[in-house]
């Protein structure tokens, strides 16, 4: 019986370890914590859409529309900005030093505890 509980406990831990928490503040200022899987090759734009946040993701994650523009509020070490992301942000509105395109941020375990705020819509 004890082995069964140990198995269940280990399985729960394995499942839990692939889920991280990300705090997202929407455009109305409401802040919520959302779960995001690290093993489904998702990016932050897709996580926002999955939780029905008002992120359009118009270009499908190709760094071509900036509808997934977010401000990073924590000091997590995130992947370097690609040339495409930098070029798109150069043309976007409301850009700040902590701006990133959510579609270019693949969800990884290191992002646990990340906090972002949705940038204003520019359309
Ligand atoms: S979804 Fe278009 S730039 Fe991110």
Image (spheres, rainbow, N blue to C red):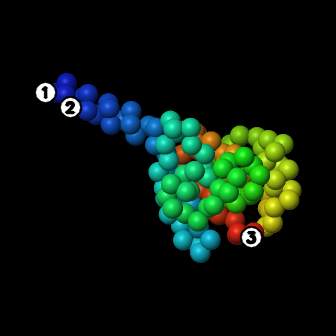
Which residue is pictured at 75% across the width and 69% down the height?
A: 122
Q: Secondary structure at mark 2?
A: helix
Eye-nearest disc, 1 or 3: 3
Residue 74, horizontal then vertical, whole percent: 65, 54
Q: Which mark is residue 25?
A: none
Is 53 positioned to the left or the right of 92 in the image? left
Cα distance between the residues tagged 1 and 3: 59 Å
Q: Quadrant of the C terminus?
A: bottom right
Please tell me whether residue 122 is drawn above or below residue 10 in the rendered image: below
Q: Earlier in the sequence, mark 1 or mark 3?
A: 1
Q: Are marks 1 and 2 in contact (CB under 8 Å)?
A: yes
Q: Secondary structure at mark 3?
A: loop
Residue tagged 1 = 1
Q: Earlier in the sequence, mark 2 or mark 3?
A: 2
Is residue 24 visible in the rendered image? The answer is yes
Q: Quadrant of the N terminus?
A: top left
Mark 2 neighbour class, 10 Å CA radius: few under 14, some 14 to 19, many 20 or more: few
Q: Are marks 1 and 3 in contact (CB under 8 Å)?
A: no
Residue tagged 3 = 123
Which residue is pictured at 84% across the width and 42% down the height?
A: 83
Which residue is pictured at 39% across the width and 33% down the height?
A: 14
Farthest residue toward the bottom? Answer: 28
Residue tagged 2 = 5
């Amino acid at each position: 019986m004890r082995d069964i509980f140990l198995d269940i406990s280990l399985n729960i831990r394995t499942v839990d370890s692939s889920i991280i928490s990300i705090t997202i503040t929407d455009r109305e200022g409401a802040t919520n914590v959302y779960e995001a899987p690290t093993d489904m090759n998702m990016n932050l734009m897709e996580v926002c859409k999955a939780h029905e946040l008002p992120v359009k993701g118009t270009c499908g994650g190709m760094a071509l529309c900036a509808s997934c523009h977010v401000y990073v509020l924590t000091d997590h070490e995130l992947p370097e900005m690609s040339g495409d992301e930098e070029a798109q942000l150069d043309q976007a509105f409301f850009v700040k030093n902590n701006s990133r395109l959510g579609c270019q941020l693949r969800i990884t375990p290191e992002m646990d505890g990340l906090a972002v705020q949705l940038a204003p819509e520019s359309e």
